[in-house]
Structure formats: structure tokens, C-alpha cells
Amino acid sequence: MQMSKETYDKMNYLLGKSFDCNAQTDNFAYNIDYARYPITADIFHHSFAHEFPYFADIISDLMIKLDARPVRKQINGYEADYNGDLAAIFADNLLMCEEYRKDIIDTIEVAEFNGDYEVKIKLEEFLLQFSPYRKQADIWAEMAKRYEGNYKSFDARIETFTTVIEIKK
């Protein structure tokens, strides 16, 4: 293994967190879809939630390249019912993204402290890849607050609020 045990443990934690974020964002998407905001559900699910397994692949591929075995951790279940409250969904999504961003930074710091500079550099690049998703989460949260009580209009306009990430169909 071409990294310290501490960095290895943090990388596996970040890998598990990526899958956990996917589970959480899937629950958000299911709530949005169930509340009958189909455009928002489609954009959120395909353009945002589906990125977290891709993020996990980036982490696991780096680990394999550095002769470290990725470990697929157990993920949490998410059953929260938001009763169609898009502001609450997008606020929780923003919180999740901010925690994920901090976990990436923590892993970078551990890698630097332990002299795992290749991991540090690759995770800094990874952080730059994730940053637009964190920013998009912030925009959606702000706009959902503005549209409280009029979420059908939010649903009709979500494409205009999705400015930082690519919309995938």
C-alpha cells in the first residue's frame, strides 16, 4: 500500500460517505417525485444524486492505483418524509454537501500530515470536481426558500436555477 494507514482509513471513510450521500440524495429525489414535482425530481436525481457513485469510483480507483484495497462500508437507510417541502429537502441536501466537502478537506489534511502527497494532490483535484455540486446545492436551497408556498413554479423553473452543473436527462 502506497499510503499511510491513517490516510487509508480516511479514504475508506470517504468512499463509504460517497455511497451514503447517494442513498440520502435518492431519498430526497423520491420525496420530490412523490410530491409531484417531476421536472425537479428528474434533474435532481439524474444530474445530482447519480454523481455520488461516480465520486465513489474516483476514490476507489485512486486507492487501487496506490495498491490500497477499497472497502465498501455499510450505508445508512433514509426514510425521512418531507411531505413535499422542497425548502426542507434542499436545506438538508445543502447540509449533506457541506459535510461531504468538509470530509474531503479532512482527508486531504490527513494525507498531507502523513506525507501521502499523491493522495493529497488527487483529492485536491477531486474537491475541485465536487465544488460545483456544493454550489448548486446552495443555489437550489436558496431558491426553494424563495418559492415556499409556490413549489409548482419552482418545478417549472428549476432548469433556470441549475446553472453550475450539467443537466442530464
Image (spheres, rainbow, N blue to C red):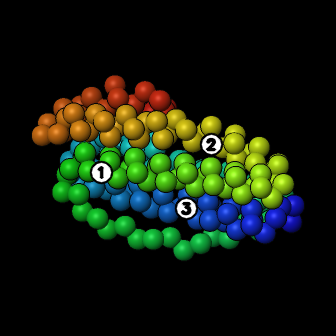
Q: CA distance from mark 1 to mark 2?
A: 23 Å
Q: Quadrant of the N terminus?
A: bottom right
Q: Which residue is mark 2?
A: 127
Q: Where is residue 24? Give x, y as percent.
A: 41, 59
Instruction: Give the residue at the far bottom of this rendering.
Output: 74
Left or right: residue 95 versus residue 38 is right
Q: How many marks?
A: 3
Who is closer to the viewer here, 124 or 47? 124
Question: In the rendered image, which residue does mark 3 sit on?
Answer: 17
- Marks 1 and 3, how far apart at CA: 19 Å
> Which quadrant would residue 106 be assigned to in this image?
bottom right
- Residues packed near mark 3 inside 10 Å, few (<14), some (14 to 19) or many (20 plus): many
Depth check, front residue: 51 or 145: 145
Q: In front here: 135 or 79? A: 135
Residue denoted by label 1: 89
- Residue density around tag 2, few if under 14, some if 14–19, many if 20 or more, within 10 Å: some
Residue at the image position 72 percent from the left and 57 percent from the top: 110
**Image location (x, y in percent) of residue 82:** 23, 57
Q: Is residue 47 above or below residue 12?
A: above
CB under 8 Å between discs 1 and 2: no
Give the amino acid type for the residue marked by disc 2 in the picture: Leu
* Lower position in the chain sequence, tag 2 or tag 3: 3
At label 3, which amino acid type do we have? Lys
Q: Amino acid at mark 1?
A: Ile
The residue sitting at the front extreme is: 113
State the quadrant of the C terminus.
top left
- Res 3 seen here: yes
Spot occupied by residue 8 in the image (x, y as percentages of width and height):
75, 65
Seen in the image, is 122 located left or right of residue 142? right
Helix, strand or loop at mark 2: helix
In the picture provided, is 75 more to the left or to the right than 68? left
The tag earlier along the polypeptide, 1 or 2, is 1
